[in-house]
């Protein structure tokens, strides 16, 4: 999910909460109460899920970065081993 899409998702969740608050203020009766409950709870649930998504994506980025660092370290170690090999011993005549 791109950062632009995540911003739109957070904005939509916030808009749902604001719309629910407006329904509470301007729509009377049972319909207003139902709209308020649905919009506010839906917006807050969406925001919570998006926060969990952000945490998961951050962990994935950290794991990927660690993996790249580990691979680079292994490549350097392998190159050093290739450079520091001991010369082969001359054979003794028999």
Image (tube, grey):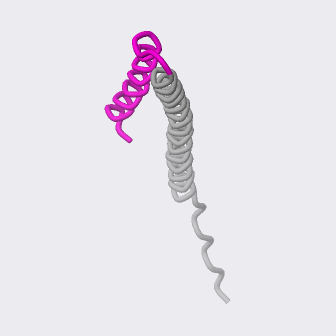
Please provide percent x and percent y for residue 22. 41, 14
Height in image: 12 above or below 88? Answer: above
Report the residue at 52% width, 49% height from top: 76
Q: Nearer the viewer, residue 65 or 8?
A: 8
Q: Nearer the viewer, residue 34 or 42?
A: 34
Q: Nearer the viewer, residue 15 or 65?
A: 15
Report the residue at 58% width, 60% height from top: 85
How many numbered tags mark residues here?
0
Please provide percent x and percent y for residue 25. 44, 10
Please provide percent x and percent y for residue 43. 48, 27
Report the residue at 54% width, 38% height from top: 62
Quadrant for the C terminus, please. bottom right
Q: Quadrant of residue 13?
A: top left
Quadrant for the N terminus, please. top left
Which span of residues is magenta-colored? 1-29
Height in image: 91 above or below 79? Answer: below
């Amino acid at each position: 999910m791109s950062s632009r899409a995540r911003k739109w998702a957070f904005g939509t969740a916030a808009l749902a909460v604001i719309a629910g608050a407006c329904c509470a203020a301007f729509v009377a009766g049972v319909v207003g109460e139902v709209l308020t409950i649905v919009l506010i709870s839906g917006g807050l649930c969406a925001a919570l899920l998006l926060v969990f998504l952000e945490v998961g994506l951050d962990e994935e980025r950290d794991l990927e970065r660690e993996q790249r660092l580990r691979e680079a370290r292994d490549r350097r170690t392998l190159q050093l081993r290739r450079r520091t090999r001991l010369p082969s011993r001359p054979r003794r005549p028999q």
